[in-house]
Structures are given as structure tokens and as C-alpha cells.
Amino acid sequence: MGFPLSQCCDSGYEMDEVQVYYDIKEAIRGKDIICTDSLPANAFNDFRNYQITKEVMDMANKNAVLNPCPPFYRGEEVSDDVIQSGYFIGYEFKKNLLVVQQAIMIWCMLYK
């Protein structure tokens, strides 16, 4: 779709055909949009070094945004300080999620 997608995770969680980072700081550098996903309880220990904090987000591009996928848990995949920061785009963005997903599906059907 014309944009690079990368993943940051512990070994064993990699997705096929996606650039993978194993260091959160390396993964964040030069990025504009940071998305997270909730962690199942049995994987939390594997991701303890992958929490998005304000300090980590400060390494992203200027005007970068954080878009954690609900439900997200402060203290797990994201820290409280980053949710309270200007990086967090808030819940208003999620109102458009269905429309965005539909547009992606239409684009894929028409152009792929």
C-alpha cells in the first residue's frame, strides 16, 4: 500500500514478510506512527522489554503519534507517561477505524 511496515517483538513472534526489530529503541527511530497490540497473559513476560514509554517515543520522528489498539493496559504494552503525553492520539481516532478498514479492503479489491 505504499508504506513500510515493521514489527518489534521477541523471537518466536515474527510475522512473515515484515521487517522485524528485536530492540525497541532501534524499532522506534525514524518512525511516524507507532501501534501496539494487547498482550495475552502468557506472552507478557516475553514482551517485558518492549513497553512503549515517553522516553522511547522521544526517539521517533518529530510529530510521531502513538496509536495503541484497545484495550491497552498502562504499565504493560504502554506506560502511563506516554498515554499522558502529546504522542497519544486519543480515542477520537478509533471512531474512524471502521471507515479506514473498509477503504483498505476496497483498495485491495480494486488495485491488487
Image (spheres, rainbow, N blue to C red):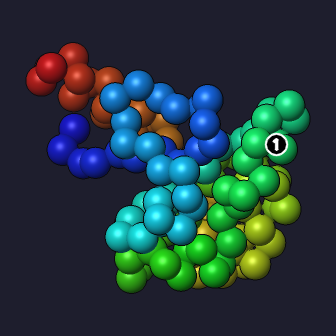
In which quarter of the view is residue 110 placed? top left
Residue shown at 61% from the left, 50% from the top: 36
* Residue situated in front as seen by the camera: 111 or 95: 111
Residue 104, percent across and down?
A: 31, 32
Residue 61, percent across and down?
A: 38, 76
* Residue situated in front as seen by the camera: 25 or 41: 25
Side of 16 relative to 84 (left or right): left
Q: Quadrant of the C terminus?
A: top left
In which quarter of the view is residue 19 placed? top left
Q: Is residue 102 visible in this depiction of the protein?
A: no
Side of 83 relative to 65 (left or right): right
Whether residue 94 is situated above or below residue 104 in the rendered picture: below
Q: Quadrant of the N terminus?
A: top left
Residue shown at 42% from the left, 70% from the top: 29
Q: Is residue 1 visible in this depiction of the protein?
A: yes
Residues packed near mark 1 inside 10 Å, few (<14), some (14 to 19) or many (20 plus): some
Q: Amino acid at mark 1?
A: Phe
In which quarter of the view is residue 75 placed? bottom right
- The residue indicated by pointer 1 is 44
Residue 40, percent across and down?
A: 80, 33
